[in-house]
Amino acid sequence: MVRLALNLLTDHDPLSVKGLSDALGLSVAGMSRALDGLVARGMVKRTEDPGDRRARCLALTAKGAKTMEGLGLDPASAERVAGAVEESFIHALSSGMWLATGVALLGAVIAAVTIKDGRGPARPRLPGGPWPGAARGRADRRLRLNRVRRQGAGTIPPPATTDPGGSLHPMAPVDVTSVADISVEPGTLPEKMTAWVIRQEREGEPIDAFQLEEIEVPEPGAFEVTVRVMAAGVNYNNVWAALGQPVSVFRYHPEEDHHIGGSDASGIVWKVGTGVTRWAPGDEVIIHCNQASYEDVEVHGLDPLAAPSQKIWGYETSWGSFAQFTKVQAQQLIPKPRNLTWEEAASYGLVYFTAYRMLIDQCDLQAGHKVLIWGAAGGLGVFAVQLCAAAGAQCVGVVSSKEKGNLVMQLGATGYIDRNEFKGMMRKGGESPEEEKERFKESRRFGKAVKEVLGDAPDIVFEHVGQATFPTSVFVLKPFGKVVICAGTTGFNLDFDVRYLWMRQKQIIGSHFANAYECMKANELIEQGRIRPVLWRTMGFDGVAEAHQLMRDNSHLGKIAILVGAEREGLGRTEDGPGAIAAEVGA
Ligand code: NDP
């Protein structure tokens, strides 16, 4: 069978869906529909490459291959593409030959579908080159990105509505130059605000799913507070929200047909609901993202994370921080550290508080512990590394480039390992016994590299990658050690040799965000400058969609902040302090 793997994410990857859509002169949405059409017709089937969460593979079926043959396409070309894909991850490819072959291959299949369905003539194929319209596709895409990049340009026009299955919510042009202007004083809310909104019918790539809308300002209910957002933080959860995967967020909040994402913010309390006594309009705050009903008994004795009503604000709820105002429960508010700017203060809560609970409470991190941290230069990772350093523990960070390695060393890691040197250890799923033997050998080699850095096997493995790395995590851990896990980015079905768990009495601990007390304790370390936000980039309010796309492409380091009410970077600090660490190098 011929396999054509398409990286759905990387802009620069010629075989990405975006690359192909540009080359074919189709919109990404159009391209996605075309791919759906091919899947529906049984010409290709979707698979996933668990070795890399960014890769989504399409396997050409026998029917698809036959169609290609009927069109006189060279199956050997497809085989070459497939071979290259299997040898190295698709985003490593740079050869123009593969671009030409890949485009020709997929374009031809689409052409076949088009002809078969009688939906008009197929585009003529250029031998070995991109389709006519490529330039237009690229230009359109650049235009759309520029549209969101150019905050200074003022009004952002609504997206083109040539899409027949397009938005059910036609939008008026939205002026983003005035998001920092509020016409009312604290205590009074305006009627409307500007917000980045995801709607169910446009779930897909973040760059398309997020769109600007004018929407009503939420009034605070009992024990609730409406906060004017000064800056917002970008997290991976709203990449999932944009994609509608693994489930649509509209399942979590069916009462609202809009999703305003954003689970981190710094801001000013603007209006308080009945029953709120600790906070008043004008207070400067940051917001932690855990919500639960005060009526659930778990909140009052076990942990709010155990409550049936528990939800993550700005992901499982709407009214998140990518808007001029956000609505939260009063218990979510924490005083803003005075030594941080608005953007620094907005950048860290979700990932830092999660890492804090994972290491400090779930694993009882101690001085002298040895810790293995996957994705150490990512959102969770940069805080896991700093927590280890602050606790006097040693840690090794796993990263995918030298630049990321340099960052984790700067944060206090004992050493780092480039995972590209151990590609073979990644669990793909469905390995044959022979393949599993080879994979295991690589895990063992990786375990040796970990010991070389730490001097011994790790007491704790900090996990969130999931399927691809979990068997290695369990294997390399010291007897009686703990794997603490809060996500399965590469896949949720974990498959590992359980003998290494029971014989060596290791533990697996699930962890999810943090409770208000943990958030407050963790925040004190920020106030003391012992843990510092790691800010890679601050973008204007126009950058929300682009920021999520960068994250989806894994083209970021540390955190991205978005200015909302803050007119420019550097505002909001009222006390001297170390501030954020700038992750200055590109990914
Ligand atoms: P980031 O994208 O910022 O960082 C994740 C890191 O994982 C990347 O920097 C990347 O680093 C690494 N990575 C990606 N793919 C692989 C792979 N195949 N093998 C090994 N490493 C890989 O995301 P976050 O740290 O913010 O979040 C990570 C996950 O945790 C997400 O799924 C998020 O939704 C979840 N999460 C869950 C929380 C909870 O409360 N349950 C809270 C916060 C996050 P590199 O390429 O350098 O190896």
Image (spheres, grey):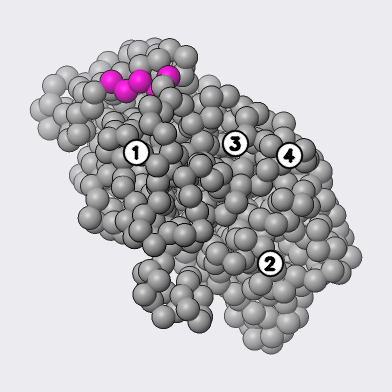
Residue beneath disc 3: 343
Dominant SS type (magenta):
loop
What residue is shown at x 64% (from left), y 73% (from top)?
362
From mark 4 to mark 2, how far is it between C-alphas? 29 Å
Residue 16 visible in the displayed image: no
Residue beneath disc 2: 359
Three-letter code, disc 2: Leu
From mark 4 to mark 3, how far is it between C-alphas? 15 Å
> Is the residue indicated by label 3 positioned so its CB lies within 8 Å of ligand 1?
no
Circle number at residue 575: 4
**Seen in the image, is 578 located left or right of residue 335?**
right
Q: What stretch is highlighted in magenta?
A: 173-177
Three-letter code, disc 1: Leu
Q: Which of 31 and 441 is in front in this view?
A: 31
Question: If you read the primary sequence from the N terminus, does the residue marked by circle 3 or circle 2 appear first?
Answer: 3
**Residue 327: x and y, percent?**
38, 49
**Residue 365: x and y, percent?**
75, 70
- Closer mark to the observer between disc 3 and disc 2: 3
> Is the residue indicated by label 4 positioned so its CB lies within 8 Å of ligand 1?
no
Circle number at residue 189: 1
Q: Nearer the viewer, residue 518 or 150?
A: 518
